[in-house]
Image (cartoon, rainbow, N blue to C red):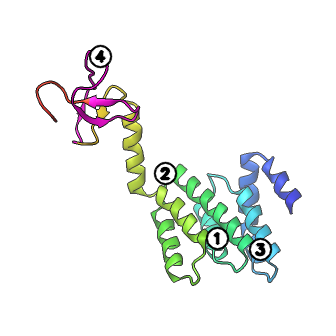
Amino acid sequence: MNAAIEEVREAETAERAHLFVSSVEDFTQYYYADDGYQRLSVVRFLRQLYVPHIPDEYRETFWDLLCEAIVDDDGRVRKAAEKAIDKVITFTSYRKQLVDPLRAELAEIADMQVPTYSEIHSALSTAERYTAESLELSTINLMAAKLPSLTLNPVHHTRWPPTQGRTGSCRRTVGVASDGCSRRAPEGGVR
């Protein structure tokens, strides 16, 4: 199986997508075996074939398999499923599709699974990074990074241009900027 995984790793994206679409249902059937190594191999191989532009119906087939694999009795299968779930979530977000339904399904699995495996929580953490709310915060942080002349004052939550005293030290420190420099309040009062 390792040789097959290495071979598909070298394949072009379009070829991997075609192989995934043509084989995901067959490999899903192979997953339901008593052999943990076979289940592990199926998850690893399909994860290697998975690319961003897989049609939704095939992604859903793979997702259903991963939701079972993340609670597999075999820890090797759970680890492989965790990596595959991270990839599916990342690519789903890349395609600008909502990750919230995937996160909700993982949260439900985590709530119902006893014992709760760490792999579930790790996969859930990945999903939460790509939810709408966290993406909005990422966008805000990205926009703030592109405006270096403005500093977000963490104490008073206002923006003001940084100014320094004559000696370079701050007279009235209000907050610390991301570059580690203390900033003082503008003349005429505290904001």
Q: Amino acid at mark 2?
A: Lys
Span of residues in magenta: 156-183
Can you tell which mark lies on residue 167? 4
- Identify the residue at horizontal 11%, vertical 26% (top origin): 188
Dominant secondary structure (helix, strand or loop) of the stretch shown in magenta:
loop
Between discs 2 and 4, the one toward the N terminus: 2
Name the quarter where the C terminus is drawn: top left
Of marks 3 and 2, the one in the foreground: 3
Report, in whole angstroms, how far the alpha carbon at label 1 lies from the one at label 2.
21 Å
Question: Pointer 2: what residue?
Answer: 96
Q: Is residue 180 magenta?
A: yes
Q: Position of residue 111 (x, y in %)?
A: 49, 79
| Callout 2 secondary element | loop
User: What's the residue at 82%, 57% (across, down)?
Assistant: 5
Q: Nearer the viewer, residue 182 or 137?
A: 182
Q: Secondary structure at mark 1?
A: helix
Rendered image quadrant of residue 170: top left
Q: Magenta stretch: residue 38 in it? A: no
Q: CA distance from mark 3 to mark 4?
A: 67 Å
What amino acid type is highlighted by mark number 3?
Answer: Arg
Which residue is at 38% across, 55% downward?
133
Numbered disc in front, either 2 or 4: 4
Give the Cα separation between the discs numbered 1 and 3: 11 Å
How busy is the neighbourhood of tag 3: few (under 14 within 10 Å), some, or many (20 plus)? many
Pair 3/4: label in front: 4
Please give the label number shown on residue 66: 1
- Kindly identify which residue carries mark 3: 39
